[in-house]
Amino acid sequence: MPKQAEEIMAGSLSGTMPEVCEMTKRIIMVSPFPGRMHELMRTLMESCFDVLVFHRWEHTEAGALQADLLIFDVSGSEAEDPVGAFRENLHPVHAEVPTLFLVDERMLAGGVGDGAEELLVWPARPHEGLHHVRRILRSVSAREAEGLESPPPAESSRDRLIFKDLGIDRRRMTVHRSGARIDLTKTEYELLVRLIEGQGAVRTREDLLNIVWGTQYFGGSNVVDVHVKSLRKKLGDNAAKPHYVATVRGVGYRLAD
């Protein structure tokens, strides 16, 4: 009997056969280096996602397929704004499909996209990618459940946060400094909001990980440092002489005095 068949039969007899997925969602991944997507693809498939991987995004192939989530690997791109370039090439049918962009740390620090994109520094641990995918899809499901027909609530003081010359509109998820808009990613925005909500209290790296990334996040706490560094750059802040975000060495961050 072939070895593979023996392993399958042994798993069946021992009761360790994987559980059959009752419902799946389709994910399309596009990467010029699909080999390095293997671990993420396997993790997603083991978590009941149907995954298709393509070298390039083309309307005749990947672009013609329906998907619940798109993942674009632009981490090795030399384009000035690879995220924006992908967005421009998307067919209208995919314009509303949630999308996760895999970027390198250099892009994150320099600012990519329009500030509202879902970004993941790549390469990363497969379970970190799985966490992002689940969070994005949960967010989409929650918005769909709320419905588009309900009227917007009246604006209240809780919808706005003020810190020094920064103004945050929580309903629109926008940040302005002295009237000028600052484009932040969703993660950078969440970090800033949590720090301001703390009213000067120290937020440990672990607290920020649990609040912003979720308790199921398996990555290291250094991801907080990477995003705080990017946030500071966009705010024009200086880690040595902070005006907005101060570092508490060995602990985390708080609002600057």
Image: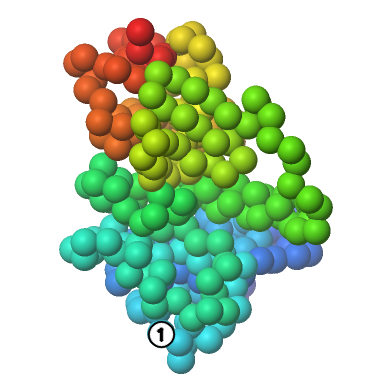
On the rendered structure, is 237 left or right of 28?
Answer: left
Q: Disc 1 marks which amino acid?
A: Glu
Element marked by disc 1: loop
Residue situated in front as seen by the camera: 238 or 215: 238
Look at mark 1 in the image and give the residue it sits on.
58
Bin the neighbour count of mark 1 within 10 Å (Cα to Cα): few under 14, some 14-19, many 20 and up. Answer: some
Residue 230 percent coordinates (x, y): 30, 36
Residue situated in front as seen by the camera: 169 or 130: 169
Asked if residue 133 shows in the view, the reply is: yes
Position of residue 197 relative to residue 36, above or below, is above
Residue situated in front as seen by the camera: 52 or 150: 150
Residue 77 percent coordinates (x, y): 23, 64
- Which residue reaches farthest front? 179
Question: For residue 31, which quarter of the picture?
Answer: bottom left
Q: Which residue is drawn at 40% across and 19% down?
A: 164
Residue 246 percent coordinates (x, y): 33, 15
Could you tell me which quadrant the C terminus lies in? top left
